[in-house]
Every structure is written in C-alpha cells, then in structure tokens.
C-alpha cells in the first residue's frame, strides 16, 4: 500500500491540490507517521463542486438499471480490494486487524449489498387520485464523514446518493483518510462517470465549512460530533440547503430484573468496549437493578480483565489504541473525573496498560455506583469506559435513560419479550436493540434530539437523498 496520497479525486481523475499542504497521517498504535495526504482549501472545493454540478445535468437522467450496474460494479471492485481496505483502516485508526476485516471493512460491503437489494425494488412513483408523487435526486451533495467508522459512513452516504442520481463531493476525516483514498481508487476502477464522485481532503473548519456553505451544494450529509454538527447546520442555513446529521450519543443499556445477569452484563461490557469504545451508539451507560449491582460489578470486572489489549496487527488483539493523542487526553480526563466525583473504580483507571509505552492505548475501565449527573454519566467519552448505574424501579431506569441530550441508540435486556418491547417504546432513541440482536443492515439508523436528524441504511438512506415532487393533473 503506497504512503503517498497527496492528490484529490476530482472530475474522474487524481489531481494535485491547488496549493501543496501536506499532512502526515499518524498510526495511533505507534505514534509514527505512515502516510501523507494534502489539506485542501475552499478553491479545491470550488473545483470539485463545479465538476459535480456539470455531471449532475446528465447523471440525474440516468436510469435505475444504469445506476444499478454501477453499484454492482462498485461491489465487485470493493471485494477485490477488501484486504487493502482492512489494512488501511487498521493503520489509520488502530483498529485490531481482525475487527478491521470483520466489522470495519465488512460494513462497506454489507451496506452496499443492502442498498443494492433495496434499490432494486424502490418505488419511484405513487399515484394519489390524479396526482403522481415522484422521487427525484436532491442534487449535488456534500458528504462529510468521521474517523471512527470510516467505511461504514462513507458507504452509507455515497451508495444511496449515487443510487438516487445525485453527484457528490466527499470529505473524509483528515485523522483517518487513507480508507477514503482507497475508496476513491475503487470508484475510479469501477468506472463511475467523471464528476459524479469527487473527494477533497481537509479539515472541518476549512474544507467542511466551505462545502456546507457552498451555494452549489444542495444538501449536506454529516456524521460527527454534535458540536461540529451545529457548525455545519449554521453554515448551511444561509442557502437553506437540506442537512442530514448523525451525531453523538450516550446510549443507555437497561438490564431488566429478569435478565440473565451474567450474559447481559458481560455482553454489555464487550459492546461498550467494541471499536475501543469509539462508537457513537456504544452502550456506555449500563443500568442494573440496585440489588444486583454488586454482582454486576464482579461480572463486569472479570469480563474487562479478559479483554486482550495490544498490537492491532496481532490477530488475537481485541482492543487497540484510541485514534489520537487528543482523544487519549480527553478520555484520561474523564476517567479522572469519575474518580474525583466518587464513582467506584471497578477495573482499569488512568494511564496506559502495563508495558505499553508507545501508542494511545488506555486501560479498559469500568465504574460502578455511577450517579446521574456525574460527568462520566453525562458526557460522550468515546473510549472503553463503562458506567454502571443502579436503579430501584424500571420506571426510574427509563427516566435515567431518557435524561440525556442525546438519543441515538438504546439497549434493553430481559427474558420477558413483551416487557422489553414496552420499555423500548418508552425510550427516546432512534434505535433500540433488544437482547443484543445481530446487526440489521436494513433497519433505520439515526437519532432523536441532539443525536441528529434523518435516517441512514438501505432504503431509508436512499430517501434522504431524494426530493418529492407532486405532478398534479
């Protein structure tokens, strides 16, 4: 895999930026630069938007079958580059290689397959009386994606935008941009018409802001922090463009009194620690009946101690480093706050794991006796840190779960399915997962409250990139 990714992809070709502004990409496991990209400017955005606008005139008129053939060719090339994608993600964000293959790279393939299946049966037109209600592409879209699930979010935006007939400009995260560059190579090899897909690397405050404010952009689809999402919405407001956002989360995991405690707690710990805790929908607040609290802490402790932290290149590694020094320091400060505010440190704590001097590694950490209002209960930590909160009644658990500015996901564990469903309906979250189900790529994904708006995955994502027109006669 080459280490020079200093070009952008604009109008069907890899081109030099208008101004050379190289940036080293750091491997978080070694703290060493392993690749170089360029940081773009508003001029690079102008060039990419111009290419996308020119391409939209004809691409928006292509047929379903023509676009379906492009998607199927994308899938074919993606599969042939699967290992390259896994290796890129492992290097850029420290994902353990087994997870980079089975979850991170798989997400790109899985979402593309689900989109293709949904697109084949998508109903463009509906007749209501004498009116034809039809779906048309929204236009030129700006796609801004995060570092924590790079290919999941790129594919969840690019594939439905292309299927809808939109043209696009993608800005991957500058922290983990190499998977995005590999994806651009895939799009090029798949023969996507020039100008339909464009990629400009850069920072959010510069390239992201230029994209979201650009008068030639009709829609912005953004995934990232709630703070950055408000900036995107503010920049987009002047041109009244559509904004779809998938933002932060602080998801509750309610363990009901009748749940299998051993299974519910141990799987909840592993769910929180998955992707090194760097998932916006991670079940980071575990609510357990007060009389089972001490037993839950012991199960959580034993589970955490069994997690293998180490070199992402090792197939046995389950927990890699955090993505950056900034993220490491943020998580350390929040762990310290948990101790200072009186939560019980069950396992883990400040500092790096023993013997790990290089890399942004943190100790898998569990707190017990966490009370509503503590920073570790309120703030999105984005690291392998679990808060266990005791509750007296299920009604109190629901209240605590909903007492957050976020509403991306929630989790409920219990043997009584009717009760689990009853609790799920009371939770203010875009997705509620009962008893740790398998990943459903056809379920809607998106949030309530400050976790965003709009929905991704399969046909839900497809609709986000379409306008509705009524032809009245």
Image: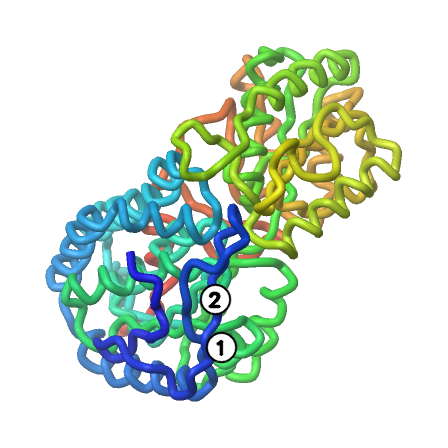
Residue 435: x %, y % from top left: 51, 22
Residue under circle 2? 24
Report if residue 413 is visible in the image: yes
Q: Looking at the picture, tell me which residue is in the foreground, 25 or 180.
A: 25
Residue 409 visible at all: no
Q: Residue at x 37, y 54 (%)?
A: 156
The residue where tag 1 is placed is: 207
Quadrant position of residue 16: bottom left
Asked which secondary structure carries label 2, the reply is: strand
Kindly indicate the quadrant of the structure image that contains residue 370: top right
Callout 1 secondary element: helix
Is label 1 or label 2 in front?
A: 2
Residue 113 placement, left or right of 339: left
Report, in whole angstroms, how far the alpha carbon at label 1 lies from the one at label 2: 17 Å
Residue 200 left/right relative to 329: left
Label 1 or label 2, whichever comes before in sequence order: 2
Residue 25 image point, x, y percent: 47, 62
Q: Crowding near pointer 2: few (<14 within 10 Å), some, many (20+)?
A: some
Q: Is residue 113 left or right of residue 315?
A: left
Q: Quadrant of the N terminus?
A: bottom left
Residue density around tag 1, few if under 14, some if 14–19, many if 20 or more, within 10 Å:
many
């Amino acid at each position: 895999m080459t280490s020079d990714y200093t070009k952008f992809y604009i109008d069907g070709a890899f081109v030099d930026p208008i101004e050379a502004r190289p940036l080293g990409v750091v491997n978080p496991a070694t703290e060493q630069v392993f690749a170089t990209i360029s940081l773009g400017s508003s001029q690079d955005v102008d060039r990419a938007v111009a290419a996308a606008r020119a391409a939209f005139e004809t691409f928006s008129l292509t047929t379903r079958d023509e676009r379906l053939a492009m998607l199927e060719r994308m899938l074919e090339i993606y599969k042939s580059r699967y290992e390259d994608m896994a290796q890129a993600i492992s290097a850029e964000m420290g994902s353990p290689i087994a997870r980079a293959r089975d979850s991170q790279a798989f997400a790109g393939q899985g979402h593309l397959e689900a989109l293709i299946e949904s697109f084949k049966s998508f109903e463009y037109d509906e007749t209501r009386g004498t009116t034809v209600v039809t779906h048309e592409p929204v236009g030129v879209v700006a796609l801004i994606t995060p570092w924590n699930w790079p290919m999941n979010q790129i594919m969840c935006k690019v594939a439905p935008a292309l299927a809808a007939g939109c043209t696009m400009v993608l800005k991957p995260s500058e922290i983990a941009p190499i998977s995005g560059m590999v994806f651009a190579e895939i799009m090029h090899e798949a023969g996507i018409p020039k100008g339909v897909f464009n990629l400009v690397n850069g920072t959010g405050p510069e390239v992201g802001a230029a994209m979201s404010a650009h008068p030639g952009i009709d829609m912005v689809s953004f995934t990232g922090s709630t703070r950055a999402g408000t900036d995107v919405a503010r920049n987009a407001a002047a041109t009244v463009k559509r904004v779809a956002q998938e933002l932060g989360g602080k998801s509750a995991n309610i363990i009901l009194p009748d749940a299998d405690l051993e299974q519910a707690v141990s799987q909840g710990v592993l769910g929180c620690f998955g992707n090194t805790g760097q998932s916006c929908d991670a079940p980071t607040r575990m609510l357990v009946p007060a009389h089972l609290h001490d037993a839950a802490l012991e199960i959580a402790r034993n589970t955490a101690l069994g997690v293998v932290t180490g070199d992402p290149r090792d197939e046995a590694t389950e927990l890699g480093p955090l993505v950056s020094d900034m993220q490491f320091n943020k998580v350390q400060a929040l762990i310290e706050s948990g101790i200072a505010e009186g939560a019980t440190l069950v396992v883990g704590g400040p500092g790096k794991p023993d013997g790990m001097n290089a890399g942004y590694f943190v100790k898998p950490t569990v707190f017990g006796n966490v009370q509503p209002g503590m920073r570790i209960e309120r703030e999105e930590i984005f690291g392998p840190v679990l808060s266990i909160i005791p509750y007296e009644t299920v009604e109190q658990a629901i209240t605590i779960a909903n007492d957050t500015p976020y509403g991306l996901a929630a989790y409920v564990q219990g043997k009584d399915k009717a009760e689990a469903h009853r609790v799920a309906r009371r939770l203010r979250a875009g997705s509620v997962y009962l008893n740790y189900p398998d990943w459903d790529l056809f379920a809607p994904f998106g949030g309530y409250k400050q976790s965003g708006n709009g929905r991704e995955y399969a046909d839900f994502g497809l609709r986000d990139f379409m306008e509705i027109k009524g032809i009245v006669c």
